[in-house]
Amino acid sequence: QLQLQESGPGLVKPSQTLSLTCTVSGGSISSGTYYWSWIRQPAGKGLEWIGRIYTSGSTDYNPSLKSRVSIFRDTSRNHFFLKLSAVTAADTAVYYCARGISVFGVPGSWFDPWGQGTVVTVSS
Amino acid sequence: SYELTQPPSVSVSPGQTARITCSGDALPKLYVHWYQKKPGQAPVLVMYQDNERPSGIPERFSGSSSGTTGTLTISGVQAEDEADYYCQSADSSGSYQEVFGGGTKLTVL
């Protein structure tokens, strides 16, 4: 059974870089018609897609965050990572990693499963 | 930027039918997917590709899409269905970046 688990510092200072790890077990991040995403939810607000990394290693990012976001991977450890630079209080949220599932030739995809999420607070 | 629009709230009594809508200009061309989100828990996929129900999701959950509106229907609502529900699709421009609706709070009266 595929499982994802987020980890990383729960507190980040303003202007610094947020770094999170998603550990994937029960499946490989470098095979299949899948991609691997980061999604966040600020308290009291909705879900926001941050970006994704494909099994090929290519990436896509939310245009609103693109200048500050980097997603990369370590296939030998079956982990993928999120870095978000120059954080502010607006980046305080629960951060989730999730597997994106797509069908060849069909645009778009859906997310299943999700990790349990990790709370990141931006504060001095 | 592309948006998916959901009603902020829907309220139904136990045993009734709840319908949650999601509107987006690209939905005639792209699938809509749905997630259930309870406080302190990760989102759970309850419907994908408009009307496909994942394994383990009760049959009372169903989905449809017509024109620019996708609909998640919960028949015979139970107290445990009280949650936030989010639709998700993709922006039809460029590399099909993913987009979520603003979420709908389902209250079981």
Image (cartoon, rainbow, N blue to C red):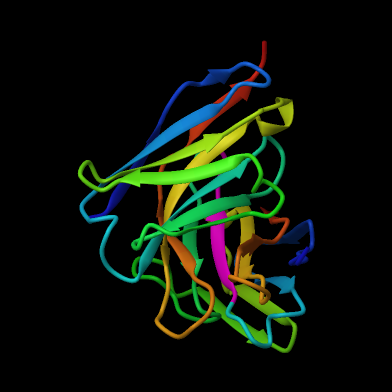
Residue B33 among those drawn in magenta: yes
| Residue B2 occupies quadrant | bottom right
Q: Position of residue B51 (x, y in %)?
A: 52, 81
Q: Is residue B38 left or right of residue B107?
A: left
Main structural element of the magenta stretch: helix, strand or loop?
A: strand
- Compared to residue A96, the image places residue A8 above or below, namely above
Whether residue A58 can be seen here: yes
Residue B15 vs residue A46, the one in the foreground: A46
Q: In percent of the image, x 47 and y 45: which residue is there?
A: A71
Residue that protrudes farthest toward the top in the picture: A124
State which quarter of the image contains the C terminus of chain A.
top right
Residue B31 vs residue A71, the one in the foreground: A71
Q: In percent of the image, x 29 and y 48: which residue is there?
A: A3
State which quarter of the image contains the N terminus of chain A.
bottom left
Q: Position of residue B26 (x, y in %)?
A: 71, 80
Residue B7 vs residue A8, the one in the foreground: A8
Q: In percent of the image, x 45 and y 85: which residue is there?
A: A105
Residue A58 among those drawn in magenta: no
Q: Which residues are magenta?
A: B32-39
Residue B21 vs residue B98, the one in the foreground: B98
Q: Is residue B29 left or right of residue A109?
A: right
| Residue B39 occupies quadrant | top right
- Compared to residue A50, the image places residue A16 above or below, namely above
Whether residue B78 can be seen here: no
Q: Position of residue A37 (x, y in %)?
A: 47, 53
Q: In percent of the image, x 68 and y 19: which residue is there?
A: A14
Q: Position of residue B78 (x, y in %)?
A: 55, 60
